[in-house]
């Protein structure tokens, strides 16, 4: 049976601010699909890029909140392999925000957060690639939380990439085809060494994965909400975590 997630302080009604997190009920890996920025801006009569700016602010706040409450792995979908289909000015706005974010990322290092970037970097601007590598290297030994950012990431692309590496090893005689297991595949994904997603959160009302961590979400619990990403705050995350804590996970057992 799932453990109760929140204790009430002094028997007060269960208001979000009076809830106390119980660490054992926290997911090991929370995945966030940060969706709804465009609609958030359009609803306010503003250009879509304002939504991305608000979404980026929320990402900063929520990633730090995850670290404060002790989530060991938090992953965020920043830009998908499919997002290149968008107008160039929108892509440029997203990449500029990502650059600003990377320039400002020392606050994570100060908090002992390890930064990991997943996705195909080869198509990104050189300055982004360089900074991503610097941040990964300087945070490599930090253990407070893994902050995983998916940029030019696609789950199918990731699996193709893994298949190519495994096939190369087979061709080179390093690995026999009949030795390939699920673990072999997991070890060749961008997320090698990281736990599978326990809780996948998608705001904005869409009920799909949009190619996010499709292998790693095989047994994830899903949490969908109509709230748009810029409005998905810490209180809303608490509600999602409480919901997760009450799910009965069986992994095929009874
Ligand atoms: C998510 O918000 C951000 C990215 C995909 C980069 P959207 O831009 O998809 O916002 P909506 O879905 O159009 O509202
Ligand atoms: C998923 O959102 C990608 C990111 C949040 C980075 P999209 O807005 O691109 O997904 P679809 O197009 O609605 O499936
Ligand atoms: Mg969207």
Image (cartoon, helix red, strand yellow):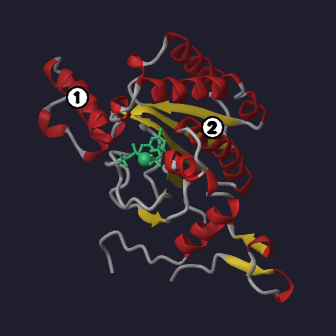
Q: Is residue 141 above or below residue 31?
A: above
Q: Is mark 2 within 8 Å of ligand 1?
A: no
Q: Which residue is mark 1?
A: 166
User: Furthest-front residue in view?
Assistant: 45
Is residue 149 in sight in this rendering?
yes
Horizontal arrangement in the rendering, residue 44 relative to residue 87 (left or right): right
Q: Nearer the viewer, residue 239 or 82?
A: 82
Disc 1 Cβ-to-ligand 2 distance below 8 Å: no
Residue 55 location (% of width, % of height): 60, 44
Question: What is the x, y in percent for residue 27?
Answer: 55, 61
Q: Nearer the viewer, residue 124 or 29?
A: 124
Dot 2 corresponds to which residue? 53
Q: Position of residue 61 (x, y in %)?
A: 71, 46
- Rendered view: 94 above or below 134: below
76 w.r.t. 248: above or below: above
Callout 2 secondary element: helix
Give the vertical position of 83 relative to 226 (above or below): above
Q: Is residue 38 left or right of residue 136?
A: left
Residue furthest top in the image:
126
* Residue at 17% in and 17% down: 172
């Amino acid at each position: 049976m799932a453990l109760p997630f929140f204790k009430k302080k002094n028997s007060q009604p269960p208001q979000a601010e009076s809830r106390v997190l119980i660490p054992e009920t926290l997911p090991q890996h929370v995945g966030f699909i940060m969706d709804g920025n465009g609609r958030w801006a359009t609803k306010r009569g503003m250009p879509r890029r304002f939504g991305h700016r608000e979404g980026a602010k929320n990402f900063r706040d929520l990633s730090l909140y995850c670290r404060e409450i002790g989530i060991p792995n938090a992953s965020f979908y920043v830009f998908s392999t499919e997002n290149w289909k968008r107008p160039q000015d929108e892509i440029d706005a997203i990449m500029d925000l990502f650059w600003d974010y990377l320039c400002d990322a020392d606050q994570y290092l100060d908090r002992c957060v390890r930064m990991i970037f997943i996705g195909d970097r080869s198509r990104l601007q050189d300055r982004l690639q360089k900074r991503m590598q610097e941040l990964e290297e300087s945070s490599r030994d930090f253990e407070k939380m893994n902050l995983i950012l998916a940029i030019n990431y696609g789950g199918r692309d990731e699996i193709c990439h893994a298949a190519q590496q495994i096939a190369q090893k087979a061709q080179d005689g390093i690995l026999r085809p009949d030795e390939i297991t699920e673990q072999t595949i997991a070890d060749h994904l961008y997320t090698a060494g990281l736990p599978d997603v326990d809780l996948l959160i998608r705001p904005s009302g869409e009920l799909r994965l949009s190619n996010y961590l499709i292998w790693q979400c095989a047994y994830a619990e899903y949490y969908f909400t109509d709230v748009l990403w810029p409005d998905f705050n810490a209180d809303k995350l608490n509600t999602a975590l409480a919901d997760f804590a009450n799910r009965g996970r069986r992994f095929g057992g009874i």
